[in-house]
Amino acid sequence: MVQVAKRASVTVDGKVVARIQRGLLVLLGVAQEDTAEDALWMAEKLAHLRVLPDEEGRMNRSLLDTGGEALVVSQFTLLGDAQKGRRPSFTRAAAPERALALYEEVMNHMGSLGIAVQKGVFGAHMEVEVINDGPVTILLESPQRGE
């Protein structure tokens, strides 16, 4: 999930551990079936996604166009399934070791493209604050491989 942010931050144990000004807040869920190819696709998509305003206020610019920053927060709860019962199931979420590796791959590739990337603390209880500009919120899913 991607939100256009005027600013965003992550706090852990009362301490701000990451902060961006203008850019994107990315809440990243990693599924069991996700691959390194999906991570690269996501990083490219995030870097080039034209959701930031141009001079006329239209969503026409990307992080690369604007020099905007990204704050990437791992969030396995995006994969929660609440169709049955009253408590979500998280069985679609990747195991922590795999999720961490793909989460870091997304951030590393974005960094290699020239995006300034901040990150949350993987596996920690985090407080995420965002001033969502627009509001603009986009749900992105990498293409299913092998279909």
Image (cartoon, rainbow, N blue to C red):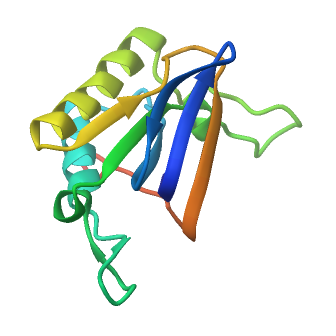
Q: Quadrant of residue 124?
A: top right
Q: Nearer the viewer, residue 123 or 146?
A: 123
In the image, farthest residue toward the right: 86
Res. 33 visible in picture: no
Q: Nearer the viewer, residue 96 or 87?
A: 96
Q: Nearer the viewer, residue 1 or 51?
A: 51
Q: Quadrant of residue 126?
A: top right
What residue is drawn where x is 48% and y is 17%? 122
Total numbered badges shown on the rendered structure = 0
- Tell me: 43 left or right of 30: left
Residue 58: x, y in percent?
A: 37, 85
Res. 58 visible in picture: yes
In the image, farthest residue toward the bottom: 56
Residue 76: x, y in percent?
A: 56, 29
In the image, farthest residue toward the top: 97
Q: Is residue 37 above or below residue 122?
A: below
What residue is drawn where x is 38% and y is 17%? 100
Q: Is residue 104 above or below residue 64?
A: above
What residue is drawn where x is 13% and y is 43%? 114
Q: Quadrant of residue 78?
A: top right
Residue 69: x, y in percent?
A: 32, 47
Q: Is residue 144 above or below residue 107?
A: below
- Tell me: 25 left or right of 85: left
